[in-house]
Image (tube, grey):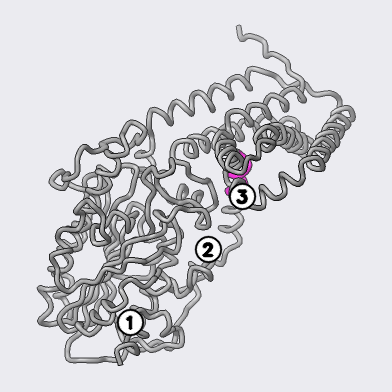
Amino acid sequence: MFQKALLIDSQKIIFWMSAYFTMFANIVFFTKLTEFASFENNYTMIITAPFILFLLLILILNIVLLITHKHSFKAILIVLIAVSALSSYFMNTFSTVIDKDMIANVVQTDYAEAFDLITVKLIGYIVMFCIFPILLLVRYKIEYKNYRAEVLNRLFMIFATLFLVGISYMVLSKNYSSFFRNHGELRYYLNPSYPIYSVAKYIKREFSSQKIIIPIAQDAKMVQSGAKKRLFVFVVGETARAANFSLNGYSHDTNPLLKSQDNIVNLENFYSCGTATAVSLPCMFSKFTRSEYSEDKKYFENLVDVISKSGVRVIWRDNNSGRSKGVADRIKDVKYFGGENVYDEVMLEDLQQSINTSYEDTLIVLHQEGSHGPTYYKRYPDSFKKFQPTCDTQDLEKCTQEEIVNTYDNTILYTDYLLDRTIKFLQNNESKYETFMMYASDHGESLGENGIYLHGMPYMIAPDYQKHIPAVFYFGNDMKEKKEILEALKTDEYSHDYIFHTFLGLFGIETKEYDKNLDIFYNKKISMI
């Protein structure tokens, strides 16, 4: 015989759920708030904020019950519990923010990448903060009064909590207004409200966005120069940060092979368009700058489309688990790799054979798996395990800071090897082609600085580690002039904004879309006259 369900009043369940979300789902929010408030000696904020949040949750849940059917209310609470539990894990463990771009990353994550995130701690969170509360909630039957009494009760509670919140604000307005104006980023950590808001924003964006590809640069044409065809390679890195490149002065020798190359220039101050691949990858190939770019802009044709329609052969090789995010959808010569123990050098295997089939201007794009975490140890063969001890697990909490950094540095060491092999591939073809390589990562990575791990934080509050990326250029012997141009100003600040126009300039493509001011090499020519 099944035990009879226990009865609980609807207002009591709202009270207990509000207390649960306040105490268990908002640890990061209160931690951040306490840090800011303590620094400003604003102890009133520390004391009153939990009470205000508790009241606001009571208000919101009463409104939800008022506007929804009573039979759906328990289902809504179950969803809120599940969302808060998963959000709490990622916010507490990695100090990440669950915004709309993070939701996009989740939706676009493949099974292998998702499996890499499963840890004992995640399972523990699911059991303790999801399954157990849901089972407890299901154990109770919510008792509702008749319709009229229930509506009056909801309205009374709504007005009562509004009154209490209003009184509190009047008393504390000076504290609260200035504090949250100065620390608006705290709203990103409210759980489960901000994750649910982010899901809603993502759904709205996906369903309201233009899905038809908009052509650009219909007037594009390539101007031939010199006797040789061009063979250019663009290596798109994954999750590499400038701070861990020894070319930028890092203590670990992560770039021994690049350092030995003569014809390279390392740009020391290069910045990404976003902090996650779902944003940065389409943005860096877009004609739009970071300030202009938004989700709907990915439906415009991009750099590889314009180069292809100008008569340049485009070859796309991709070992990234997230693939091209739509950038290469209209390119014919595309190969996707990926999988367990498939390393980035696989993308080089058929390149010589591919270019031997025809002699024409060619752009090769290599999209790495690079340094994608948290399973950094899976991104390189054992022969690149130079920096030790390492963190050979996806559960970063089991590793020391040194182990995490060492493992990440080994991924950079492997990228150094990949770039060196790419340069040697270009050198082997230098007798027939003008050769050039650009490497730039899509975004950076946090490795535990200030308790923050991985990437994907909102750009305005993201640490520099997630935005400051490496950018390395190789110039064949026919392009020494451009090397000298870039060498002269290698400490200047650049960003993904320059990629679209720089490649158009390198290929001599004329179009009204070309902006010489965003061509890395254009103004430098003037400086040498």
Label disc, if present, on residue 521 of the rendered structure: 1
Q: Report the predominant secondary structure element of the magenta stretch.
A: helix
In the rendered image, residue 244 lying in the magenta stretch gets the answer no
Residue bearing mark 2 = 295
SS at badge 1: loop
Sequence-wise, the earlier of marks 2 and 3 is 3
Which residue shows up at 44% across the image and 83% down it?
A: 515
On-image quarter of the C terminus: bottom left
Which residue shows up at 59% across the image and 35% down it?
A: 26
Residue bearing mark 3 = 183
Q: Position of residue 363 (x, y in %)?
A: 27, 75
155 vs 369: above or below: above
Question: Within 10 angstroms of label 2, few (less than 14), some, or many (20 or more) residues?
Answer: some
Q: CA distance from mark 1 to mark 2?
A: 29 Å
Q: Are marks 1 and 3 in contact (CB under 8 Å)?
A: no
Sequence-wise, the earlier of marks 1 and 3 is 3
232 vs 127: above or below: below
Q: Are marks 1 and 2 in contact (CB under 8 Å)?
A: no
Read off the magenta span. Answer: 192-200
Q: Quadrant of residue 327?
A: bottom left
Question: Within 10 angstroms of label 1, few (less than 14), some, or many (20 or more) residues?
Answer: many
183 vs 93: above or below: below
Sequence-wise, the earlier of marks 1 and 2 is 2
Q: CA distance from mark 2 to mark 3?
A: 26 Å
SS at badge 2: helix
Q: Amino acid at mark 3?
A: His
Q: Position of residue 247 (x, y in %)?
A: 24, 62
Camera-side residue: 242 or 292?
A: 242
406 vs 265: above or below: above
Q: Nearer the viewer, mark 1 or mark 3?
A: 3
In the rendered image, residue 197 lying in the magenta stretch gets the answer yes
